[in-house]
Image (cartoon, rainbow, N blue to C red):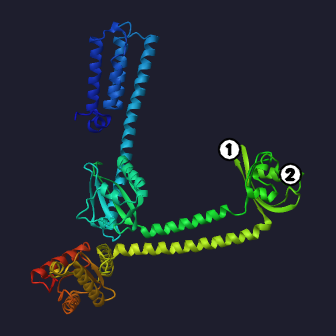
Amino acid sequence: MGVQFNLNDMHAKLSLPVRFAIAIMIFFIALLLRITIWPAEFGLTFITFYPAAFLSFYLCGTKPGFLVTVLSAFSAFYISSSPYWIADISNANLVAIAFFLAFSWLMGYVLTRGHYWHNLLINKEHNKFEEVDKQLLTTNELLTLAERSVSAGAWRWYTDTGKMVWTEQLFKLFGLNPETDEPSFDCWRKIVHPDDLKDAEDLIKEAGQNLHSFVTFYRVILPTGHVRWIDSYGGPVYDKLGNLIEFSGICINSTSLHLAEQQIQESEQRFRNMFTNLTVGYQALDINGCWLDANQKMADILGFTTPEEMIGQRFIESWSDTGEGFSTFYQHFKDNNFVEGEFMLKRRDSQPITVIISGRIQRNKEGDFMCAHSVIIDISERQKMEQKIIEMNAELELKIAERTTELSKANEELRHLSRHDALTGLHNRLSANERLHAEFISMKRSQNNYAVLLLDIDFFKKVNDTNGHSVGDSVLQLLAHILKSTLRESDFAARYGGEEFLLLLPNTELFEARLVAEKIRHTIEATPHPVAGKITVSIGVAMATPDEPDEYIAVKEADDNLYAAKKSGRNCIMAAAHQ
């Protein structure tokens, strides 16, 4: 890349004396060119001085630019203004010099102010970039949480190579086998419901082309034939320099939520259909009170056969008081833009009827009258209609209450799954990290120590290899049951890894923690699994004290002690020597 001279670099990196020196050099170059290439008699007095002034403002700033402008004006006046090499103060010369000074200073002001606005715009864009970076960090944290959730899976799409990466949970979500199915758009297209494929694919492609985030939902057809709703969230990921790295996102199983929403929409549609078919009359009048439009119920109320018979006729003919009554009513309607109340009308057979009229005036952008819309209800049918509305509202409220309960239950299940291990029912690693932080803050306030125990099943891989993963899962569940029944209510247990468990014992000293650990170790050893037989564990014990800088010091010590316990022959307990 070549060297770029720009206003921002020159002003930021060079001192004022250096910029004055550069500006004077530019002036002398312009003066030399004016004398050697374009003699005074050539005309075009300022031909080299205009570029010199502009270049000085651009490269050196306001003060050096003003200096070059003044020197250029004097030189042009003295050297290249007739009579040449003589300072002749004539009106023509003064006007030319004044124009040169004014125009040069104006352009200098534009250039220097452009530097200010340029920096302002850069700072604004930089702040925007920092905000986007923070949002991306938050998105990455959410993706990490989703990967640990039973009903969610994460994906990555490297746009430069077209390669895709799916987590194991995403394969399960799509009903695919990670050993035989390759993560790709072709594989994804095969399982997406045909009715949803085009919209979802177009949205994802559009987001990839324009580099923005997207949210979409679609159905996938599982190998069993069942349909599963998927909510998909994704967006671009950039490096610190703003270069696109990849597209990434998560997919969430939202079947229960979509089914609930679909049932609510069906209820709302039934409500709208019932309202459309209610016995309500509608009419539209022009400024003179003549019918522009009406529905069949309006024709029935006034005794017309069809609404078409009413078009063009005057509504006043159906008013019980054809004198001042209608004129007062309609003028009030137009002045106030609305009307609402009970009025007396008469049918074509002159039979009087009482109706409720509710209307609004429609006007254009200039405020001119366009038409008057009115809904008219025969009072005789009001009670019947009110009863229908009450029943409809009751049905709708019942449906909404049922769907709200279902949605609340589904949300609660999702919240529980995000913080609990699906196999053992214990808390998961996310929940453990949250409890560690809360316990650490509580210890800082109370100055009471707490104990951290890391427990690992001995030779668990051998259990899986010998008996199968289903037996291994059963062993994990047995261990979780023992922990639940052994620990105090105030204690905390979580599945921290594959066969690793983390225990927190609040307000506990080392001696007590070792007793609890020994009790757990002995209980597990004394409780053989029906298939796997005798199971043993190794336990690392550590104490968290108020002088520690963060909650992970004790976890690290417990992990080191766990490693020492395994190295010492397993089926034992280890605590830090200094404790």
Residue at point 37%, 36% (across, down): 115
The quadrant in which residue 394 appears is: bottom right
Q: Nearer the viewer, residue 411 or 228?
A: 228
The quadrant in which residue 299 appears is: bottom right
Q: Nearer the viewer, residue 224 or 150?
A: 224
Q: Nearer the viewer, residue 272 or 212?
A: 272
Tell me if I can see residue 502 in this picture: yes
- Dot 1 falls on a residue whose secondary structure is loop
CA–CA distance between discs 2 and 1?
Answer: 28 Å
Q: Pointers 2 and 1 in contact (CB under 8 A)? A: no
Tell me if I can see residue 449 in this picture: no
Q: Residues within 10 Å of mark 1 (few under 14, many from 20)?
A: few
Image x and y of residue 392, in percent: 64, 70
- Where, quadrant-wise, is the N terminus in this rendering? top left
Residue at the spot of label 1: 364
512 above or below 200?
A: below
Image x and y of residue 23, in percent: 29, 26
Q: Residues within 10 Å of mark 2 (few under 14, many from 20)?
A: some
The quadrant in which residue 338 appears is: bottom right
Mark positioned earlier in the residue sequence (2 or 1): 2
Q: Amino acid type of disc 2?
A: Glu
